Amino acid sequence: MAGLKEYLIRRAITFIPTIIGVTLIVFIIANIIPADPARAWAGGERARPEIVARIRKQYHLDDPWYIQYIFVMKGIISYFTSPTHEGAIVNPLTSRYIFDDIFLRFPTTFQLALFAEIFILTIGIPLGLISALKRNSWIDTFVRFFALTGTSMPIFWFGYIMMWIFFTNLRWTSLAGVPLPRCYEHGTCPVTTHIPIFDALIAGEFDIVMQIIRRFWLPGFVLGFRAAGVLARIVRNSFLDALSSDFIEFAKAKGLPKRWIWKHALKNAFVPVITVIGLQFGSLLGGAVITETVFGLPGLGRYTVNAINYLNMPAVIGATLLFAFIYMVVNLVVDIVYSAIDPRIRY
Amino acid sequence: MTTFPARKVIEVKDLHVHFFTYAGVVKAISGVSFEIYEGETFCLVGETGCGKSVTSRALTRLIESPGRIVKGQIIFYRDSGPVDIMTLSEEELREIRGREIAYIFQDPTASLDPLYTVGYQIAETMVAHKTADWKTAFRKAISILKSVIMPDPEKRVKNYPHELSGGMRQRVVIGISLSNKPKLLIADEPTTNLDVTIQAQILDLLRKLKKDEQMTLLLITHNMGVVAEMCTRVAVMYAGKIVEIGPVMEIFKNPLHPYTKGLLKAVPNPLSKIEKLESIPGTVPNLIYPPPGCRFHPRCKYMMEVCRSKEPPLVEVSEGHKVACWLYVK
Amino acid sequence: MPLASEEVYEKKFLDKITDKLVDTVAGIINKIKPGWIVKNKSRIDEWKLMFYAFNRSPPGVIGAILILGFILIGIFGPYFAPYSYREFLYIEYGETYLVPPGTTVVSKGKTFYFPLGTDKYGRDLVSLILYGARVSLVVSMIVIALGVPLGIILGLVAGYFGGKIDEIIMRITDTFLAFPALILAIAFAAVLPERLRPIIIYNEQLKTILSIFFAADPKDAANFAPILSVILAIIIVWWPGYTRIIRGSVLSVRENLYVEAARALGVSTWKILTRHILPNVISPVLVLITLDVGAVILVEAGLSFLGLGAQDPMVDWGKIVYDGAQFFPDRWWLVIFPGLATFLAVLGWNLVGDTLRDVLDPRTRRSIEFKIKKKKPVPSSEEGGSS
């Protein structure tokens, strides 16, 4: 793999300044508010002055911004570096480590995104390939229509309509809470990935798995619907471009069997497609916020919105950072896959 | 020069290819017939759009929609006997392509898949036609690169196309085509996209390989200089028809068709003083509504009344030299 | 592409309208820059041709009608609304003030008819949707008008000058792009109102301008801040995308010889950027802008749905759903109608953008053009006549 390792190292290195930039932006966001959060945390109007003063001291709210920044960063990092979370930053409202709260909710959002991505890939890619093979047929027009309407619908509108069809009328889904494997309670899980559906599968609790599916499939579908349409169109165009390339004509002139020719076309078509899949993940994370609100899922998105409403800046910082971090990791993976497939971009 | 008895490699009879576009039906090729004999270098010459590339593709039915071969026979003389390409199934056709008839196209960059190494692309041609398994094929790829005079073949075989220069890529393409020792090699403007110095090298290479492998070469070009250097026989095409065909020396010494004369006059002789650059007045006709009669008549200074209404037949004027022009019909 | 003889094209009624449109615009430009029409005749013909191609596409025309509707309703809607958004009618219906669509209610001696029902304060939904259209229109227009040029300029500068400037701009751009867009927008939309509110309240001029824009009562000035924050938040999230795209295009266009030639001739940098580089990088972006208007409307509706945009008593489409979602599905009209309005508005922009993409792509456009030409046979003048 010519130059792949060097490229990956270079790519990983650019990760660091971006993360620092990201934390800076988040910090700036948190400090736009002129209002005094300490008071809100201490209970609002009725807050006792001593408590407000203590909070100000604890969170360094009277210190200049760079001290605050360092304090917050240290608080975040020490959550991960110390096994007892020594020195980690604490949620002023719940008195728990913010990352405890965040990681409690992360699996829900993860499962939601997982279901959504499964829909996107299983609907989008086959539809795209079919409409490429049968271009200008009714399937092609249908996929185009599907993509256009999908991207025009507000998630909440689509979500409530689907909810009405599938919950109110058909009861094919449930809206209650988040099912967890029984072994969480008993502490008897053989392996803990912290993702309920995986753990339930591994522990063999298939009824729990079904419950999780019942709960998550509809929100996942709603979240993934619009991206599936867009992906189908992109797959279609990319595949058609690849099929009409000159090297495909040469491959036919070489007398290669049809399947081999498709392999060449697909690999070339796939390259722009994975970039799109990575980019779509970003809107997936954003859309998760709305979907969680519509379907009542206690995930990271709703947590972030709540934190904002309570001016809970440490929580906002933590949650936003996690979102950004996840998105960056996904794009890094996409870049790695991209450079593994396409040797031209390794420079 | 043809030697007796000459065996035919491929014979085209009354070929018609139409393109059914949204603008109308383009009659790209109308009634083209010729034969290619074993061991010769046969040239197809003409302006852009005259149909020479389409003819070359049609020989193995590589024409894609919206194009279609609507009429004609293509007799390919295999070792096992003559066969009409028009009657073969897709699978039988696939066996011939890349093995008995091979191609080289104009743009080497466009012919290679950027995501695979050149070694892989050479090897896959052999494996596809079962002339070798993958391990052997990769080893053979190196010796093929040697035969096309690629510098440093052991290293180059693992390179990707974008890591090679234009000339090197064309060598790879030639190597791919020759890997299965084809009977007929069709080269469609193989040097047009290359630098002039590389052009000479590639043409030399083709000549050498043709001799070593005892192949027949069908060379398509618009460059009369290349024709003079490489070809034994040449066919001149215009607006989808063959207007003159014959041995190269004969055509150069004694061009008969007004178009051929114009083509040859258009190349200035660097050794003589020239007052004016000669060109053929007018433009290539619209092949959706081609002119009636002889397709060249709107641009021909010898045009007669009959040229406007009736198409001239291809008549033999001297040994092996045929022309389609009313001037030469008794 | 000469429109040598007008009979070559079979024109439809729609084509005559767009022809008039192009001629009017050309006339206006001609008044500002005399002689412009004469110099740019072929460009004018080209525009007319593009409109013909556009008019041949039913989805495109439907989209254009939807957009026109959105803009007209957005501008004039509030003036035609039967009730102001501040009119809490509080008509009792059952235990709440929520009246279903199509009901006529008699109360306090007067008859009220609510085609689309009312919200929890008894406000007429038709009026609310009309006011909401104004907010959506204003927000999307301002975001595009400010955010897109900002992104394009930064992209031009980064791509053309390269070096350190490029590094700095791209670092900042990449950092912003590392965030999922909606998340960042939510964060900014949530924290900015506190900052902006005092600025608005104490600035009379700003208050008046904004109340005209939002068709709102100046008494609600405190609520302009969240909407303004939404606008700013979306702009912040939107410009990096354009910067990256434009920079990429500029990098490839910059290498073209005509740029080097212009530089060698001593053409000023500004002229090079506007005359040579910009026209060549802008066309894929035009389609993007059209599609983005729809996207901005959706983001804005999403933010309101989360409670971040307009606050009581002001409305926009997302806010209506935010208030009404708790009653779903019994009082379905509070979710369905505003959502439908949003859908139709965005669909219009998407249809037009998609059709525009086909029209601007030279490959697909030719096939459309020949369909226009084919209807009437070309008046043949010579044998083998080509057109």
Image: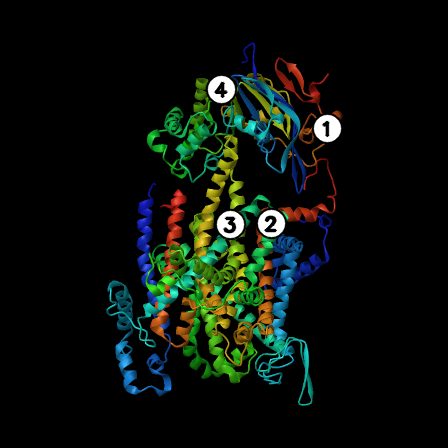
Tag 1 subunit: B
User: According to the image, label 1 marks what residue?
Assistant: B293
**Relative horizontal placement of residue B321, taking residue C208 as reference (left or right):** right
Tag 3 subunit: A
User: According to the image, label 4 marks what residue?
Assistant: B215
> Is label 4 on the same chain as label 3?
no
Q: Quadrant of residue B245?
A: top right
From the viewer's side, name the closer residue of B283 and A301: A301
User: According to the image, label 3 marks what residue?
Assistant: A125
From the viewer's side, name the closer residue of C379 and A111: A111
The spot of residue B8 in percent (x, y) is 57, 16
Task: Find residue A140 and name its label.
Answer: 2
Q: Name, please, the residue furthest toward the top.
A: B4
The spot of residue A135 in percent (x, y) is 60, 46
Q: Amino acid at mark 4?
A: Met
Q: Amino acid at mark 2?
A: Asp
Q: Quadrant of the C terminus of chain B?
A: top right
**SS type, badge 4:** loop
From the viewer's side, name the closer residue of A147 and A185: A185
**Relative horizontal placement of residue A124, taking residue C190 as reference (left or right):** right
In space, the residues marked 2 and 1 are separated at their CA atoms by 44 Å
Query: Nearer the viewer's eye, disc 4 or disc 1?
Result: 4
- Label 3 close to label 1 by CB (< 8 Å): no
In space, the residues marked 4 and 1 are separated at their CA atoms by 38 Å
